[in-house]
Image (cartoon, helix red, strand yellow):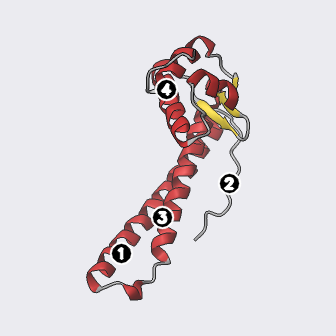
Amino acid sequence: MTEIYPHPEWKRLYKALIPALKHDREFGYEELSALAGIDVRSDRGRAQFHRCAKEILRNYSYYFENQINKGYRLVLPQEHAMAGIRQLEFGRRRTVKGLAIVVYTQTGLLDDRQRAIHADVEARLGRAVAFQQGQVNEVRQIAARVQALPLPKPMKGDKL
């Protein structure tokens, strides 16, 4: 007879991971899936894992970083600043993509009201991209000076 676990799965995973928390430890997808009772590579499983990881970060100050095709790793405290910078860069990339969508819109198919809204959104997204890029540059320089950490490589495909 199989054991029935209550939803949400993140609570089960959270309880199982707490005793295993150790910086630089890796957790394979299979191990996490077994602990959670759901495939952490599925949409629902990934959402459950991320909720669990968020709670662990808040309550225990351990941050999980994805290891492509492997699973997740608990990041060393010395790497947290760079992990934060990578997240800032990912956010900036998404904003750049949003701006590209607006820039390349077929505005000839819009009425006057829609064109006005479109122009406002384009201007705001443009300012957001510029601001985020400035923040990324400043934070990277601070991290390089204060923590003497290597700078992450610039991400490809950021230009419109």
Q: Which mark is residue 70?
A: none
Q: Earlier in the sequence, mark 2 or mark 4?
A: 4
- Identity of the residue drawn at 60% across and 37% down: 83
Instruction: State the residue position of label 1.
Output: 118
Q: CA distance from mark 4 to mark 3?
A: 31 Å
Q: Is residue 112 left or right of residue 156?
A: left
- Identity of the residue drawn at 63% across and 26% down: 32
Indicate the quadrant containing the N terminus: top left, top right, bottom left or bottom right. Answer: top right
Residue kind at label 3, given as amino acid type: Gly
Residue kind at label 1, given as amino acid type: His
Q: Are marks 2 and 4 in contact (CB under 8 Å)?
A: no
Residue kind at label 4, given as amino acid type: Trp
Q: CA distance from mark 3 to mark 1?
A: 12 Å
Q: Are marks 2 and 1 in contact (CB under 8 Å)?
A: no
Could you say where residue 20 lies in the image, as x and y percent from the top left? Answer: 63, 14
- Residue furthest to the left in view is 113
Q: Earlier in the sequence, mark 3 or mark 1?
A: 3
Q: CA distance from mark 4 to mark 1?
A: 40 Å
Q: Which mark is residue 154?
A: 2
Q: Earlier in the sequence, mark 2 or mark 1?
A: 1
Are there few (<14), some (14-19), or many (20+) residues within 10 Å of tag 2?
few
- Please name which of the two marks, 2 or 3, marks the residue nearer to the observer: 3
Residue kind at label 2, given as amino acid type: Pro
Q: Is residue 6 left or right of residue 2?
A: left
Could you say where residue 158 lies in the image, as x and y percent from the top left? Answer: 61, 63
Indicate the secondary structure of the residue bearing disc 4.
helix
- Please name which of the two marks, 2 or 4, marks the residue nearer to the observer: 4
